[in-house]
Amino acid sequence: EALDTDTRKLTDKRNKILGESYRLFYRNPVHLVRGEGQYLWDAFGTKYLDVYNNVASIGHCHPAVIDAVNAQMKMLNTHTRYLHEGILDYTEQLLTTFPQEINRAMYMCTGSEANDLAIRIARQYSGGTGIIVSQEAYHGTSDLTSGCSPALGTGQTLANTTRLVPAPDAYRVNTPDLGEWFAQQIQTQIDDMKVHGIKFAGFLADSIFSSDGVMPNPIGFLKKAVDVVHANGGIFIADEVQPGFGRTGDAFWGFARHGVVPDVVTTGKPMGNGIPVSGLFAKSDVLSAFSDQTPYFNTFGGNPVAMAAAQAVFKVIQEEQLQAHSKKVGTLLQAELTKLMNKYECVGDVRGAGLFIGFEIVKDRISKEPNKAFALDLIEELRNTHHVLTSVAGPYGNVLKLRPPFAFQEYDIDWLVGALDKSIAKLQG
Ligand code: PMP
């Protein structure tokens, strides 16, 4: 399929002057020029429904963030070695969302940096090095975090201290007690570390297992796993980059759905609605094992402008009750998607929490054989014909990840579900 001239020009230029690791979405790449709320516009003026971007979590170009950043940028932007109220005000507010034991905050610019520091803290606190992550986990770009990110594929060598557990996949794992099963997987890997002379340091997990294909349920399944982690002297690091900030609807943090208290929590993506800001929140005794030895300074992390953005985001989530909104609209959307599952054999499973939904495409319901090719054709059809933007996740690349900005409204469900309905019907021929 021939690309339009402008699209071809930009694509060629990228290929020529950007690093080759960059990957574009779509066979016909989208050239976006503007965003507002849940909608995006491309260079041709076509309007798209964004069902994927959880960074612009409170909506693209939200005026509250623009105004807060603009005002602070005009006043001052410097680093955390001078006193400033912004970082303290935000921290006081955000700490109210955590269990009491989590009472210390640090700031960086990316989820990768937060997880990188979390791994260093786990090692310092435990005296070990071994880190457990899920089979298809992604935790970041740094050496430590990419060494714990099997999602990067065979080109990325995992650290020899990294151990993988299969994802807690309620759709595919046949067990009466997923929590017990998952806890056993953790124990098996800790035992394997011992055999290889590696001391266990911690379990690092995205509590909604986004890159494993979105695994939110059953609520509470993480509890036994976290108990095993603690019984073996390790810490639990909750990577809240994806499920945090009200996304799941059930709780402000993904871990809270499971009734567990992490030792360290890392955040990123939606925290600043696009302004690079991330955080690490920890129990003070766990953190001090690291901080007492080692200074930490992050040039841009926690600066007044980043904190102004984060504070504006938090305020909007609270004032507009976006967690409740995510729950309500997400539940309605899931119900409509479930109707599609009942209509089409190729939709094997619909699962989610709030506006974070996995829509799994299979060859048939009995074999549950993943149908990656169909899932990819489906997201192309959604983009080309219906102007709906989303993507796939999971080890087989067959799970559509539906995770729109909270600006997504009840009236947008028709656009999305209608598009899915027509696209699946068309592709089935
Ligand atoms: N953890 C998870 C679960 C993520 O999804 C990501 C980003 N996709 C990261 C960490 C890394 O965040 P960043 O890209 O901001 O470094």
Image (cartoon, rainbow, N blue to C red):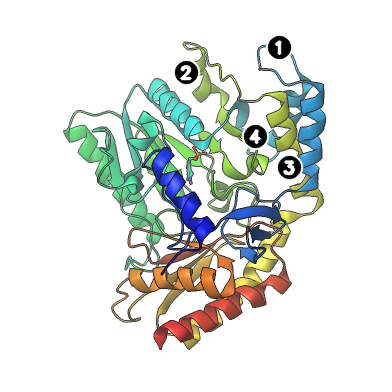
What kind of residue is marked 3? Phe
What kind of residue is marked 4? Gln
Identify the residue position indicated by label 3 in the image: 314
Residue occupying the point 55% across, 83% down:
339
For marks 3 and 1, give the CA distance: 24 Å
Question: Disc 3 vs disc 4: which is toward the camera?
Answer: 3
Q: Are marks 4 and 2 in contact (CB under 8 Å)?
A: no
Residue 217 place in picture, x, y as percent: 48, 62
Identify the residue position indicated by label 2 in the image: 290
What kind of residue is marked 1? Tyr
What kind of residue is marked 2? Phe
Which mark sits nearer the N-terminus, 3 or 1?
A: 1
Q: Are marks 3 and 4 in contact (CB under 8 Å)?
A: no
Which mark sits nearer the N-terminus, 1 or 2?
A: 1
Identify the residue position indicated by label 4 in the image: 100
Residue 112 place in picture, x, y as percent: 47, 34
Q: Which mark is residue 35?
A: none
Q: Observer-nearest residue: 338 or 228?
A: 338
| SS for callout 4 | loop
For marks 1 and 2, give the CA distance: 22 Å
